[in-house]
Image (tube, grey):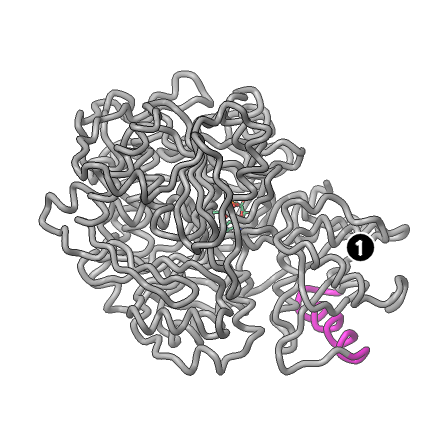
Amino acid sequence: MSNESLANLLKEERRFAPPAELAAAANVTAAAYAQASEDRLAFWAEQARRLDWATEPTETLDWSNPPFAKWFADGTLNVAHNCVDRHVEAGNGDRVAIHFEGEPGDSRAITYAQLKDEVSRAANALLELGVTKGDRVAVYLPMIPEAVVAMLACARIGATHSVVFGGFSADAVASRIQDADAKLVITADGGYRRGKATALKPAIDEALTKCPQVEHVLVVRRTGQDTAFTEGRDVWWHDIVERQSAEHTAEAHDAEHPLFILYTSGTTGKPKGILHTTGGYLTQAAWTHHAVFDLKPETDVYWCTADIGWVTGHSYIVYGPLANGATQVIYEGTPDTPHQGRFWEIVQKYGVTILYTAPTAIRTFMKWGDDIPAKFDLSSLRVLGSVGEPINPEAWVWYREHIGAGKAPIVDTWWQTETGAMMISPLPGVTTTKPGSAQRALPGIAATVVDDEAREVPDGAGGYLVLTEPWPSMLRTIWGDDQRYIDTYWSRFEGRYFAGDGAKKDEDGDIWLLGRVDDVMLVSGHNISTTEVESALVGHPAVAESAVVGATDATTGQAIVAFVILRGTATDSPELVEELRAHVGRTLGPIAKPKQVKVVGELPKTRSGKIMRRLLRDIAEGREVGDTTTLADSNVMNLIQSQLPAQGDQA
Ligand code: 6R9
């Protein structure tokens, strides 16, 4: 690494003040920053009181054995009671918890009272199947309400769930079931995606040939397709759940009781089982959802478009929103089924007020064209969220203009599976936002940027994002591997959590995320972030999306190679390619000018929408394409290769 540290090239001067009306009635004001910086632990102890505890905690943080934290350790509570029962007890049983919208167009509204009955029945069914407190349960379901019910039923009885994304292969499911040593699997016959009924159960049947410890498979009927059943092992959800009593007394669990394991793929093959516990996790999930989205449970209609198989689905579909008594939309399918306006049709149908989605989706909508959202009434939207990747300033501005009518504030929320809940984000009633910046750590959170020697960088400089104090929803360990937890997160910088992301601080001290440090390029001795070059490219009116990689180069160390997807109206030509190179040069400086720009129709993404630059690097360096098991669409790499001319042009 050169001393100059990570690049700091992009200048973004646009500023957007919070809407006056929102600011005047905001759930959280600037006072929260002052309060938290005065006494961080007292701040979190106060937020914990938003929950209903069976035993109120007297302790806040136990950090006597770092990096193993305990939060609210002498408190006890039940997560399902907090997410469901207490809202019914408060007289809100008739409030809709979930507006479910199936891909084929079927819909269901589920009130908090109905959700309470369903979760209680499912909890009783789990008990009948021999699941008890401390057992692990794997969940492999489409985006249907039963996924929420299954998770809450586990939480209710103290079983630890491990949700595996419904798009993962039998092998990926098997290794996760084995690692967690799950004794029950909850799945479905199938789900609807892209207009088709896609089977899920066969992947479980195949996975279980390697998982003899699994005693039962609970199967939800969603599509009605033919489904093989193993006698004695497999049980239909409707057969067992429907006949249970809707009475189940939720027992209180310790604040540090394991709530869930969620696997993230590490850089080495074996996925890491990120462990989250009960009281601290729910405290931060609920408070951030209340603060960052300014949720008013009586009037807002909230929609997070993530899949329940990712941490965003856990914290901001299930636990945060339900703890806050929100009314939310859950949509089963893809944004282009049956037409490219499906999301906006849903916003219009339910009067969605808060929308939480990912930059990859926003760039796709840009590509499809401005005229599509323009056909729908989106005037209900008042807060827009982004998560999953750095959002390019142009995509941010497009989101604000075309979805938020130029008014709705955007909250760009930085966090990770490991952090459990949001860490760095604007507050919609407080922050004057900057397109492309997640801005500053939330109240009660301590983040900064350091250089190779762990020194905090001054404003205006770049380096590595670190978290300098423990936080309530932090991962507690990697399931079954404490040493890997220490090595992965706490060893690079003594006493600090290293997130693996590059970041810079601007002149005001606001944080700009620059992507994973593995993705930073070293060109002629300069560190250049892929994110900044990608943002410059998306800033050109012809470009909808781009992915930039550093390819080994004999003269410059690495050379910048850009893959771009054009917007609907633009066409590929040598002149356009030249213009894009020049555009990056003008925006960021000549050093950042890509050596090659390749126009493609698709980019390789993980199933949660993150670009897999590693695979593009293989192409750029003329190598055989590596491991593609986490790729969302396995045909994409063939497609990209077939679209590219031979190597060596445009040098
Ligand atoms: C919630 C989630 C975590 C990684 C993280 C970073 C990237 C997430 C971001 C962002 C820039 C944001 N990331 N949000 N980068 N700005 N607002 O996505 O968790 O799937 O574990 O990914 O995603 O690189 O380190 P996870």
* Visible residue check, residue 440: yes
Q: In terms of depth relative to the viewer, which is nearer, 67 or 128?
A: 128
Give residue 36's position: percent from left, percent from top.
29, 40
Q: In terms of depth relative to the viewer, which is nearer, 362 or 435?
A: 362
Give residue 361's position: percent from left, percent from top.
52, 63
Q: In terms of depth relative to the viewer, which is nearer, 64 or 363?
A: 363
* Visible residue check, residue 557: no
Q: Amino acid at mark 1?
A: Ile
Label 1's element?
Answer: helix
**Magenta span:** 573-590
In this rendering, position of residue 192 left or right of residue 235: right
Which residue is under mark 1?
619
Q: Residue at x 44, y 42 (%)?
A: 187
In this rendering, position of residue 437 left or right of residue 487: left
Give residue 548's position: percent from left, percent from top.
70, 58
Depicted 97 relative to depicted 228: above or below: below
Judge whether residue 584 is colored magenta: yes
Q: Residue at x 17, y 31 (%)?
A: 249
In this rendering, position of residue 171 left or right of residue 199: right
Q: Residue at x 34, y 46 (%)?
A: 148
In this rendering, position of residue 328 left or right of residue 422: left
* Type of secondary structure dominating the magenta stretch: helix
Depicted 449 relative to depicted 362: above or below: above
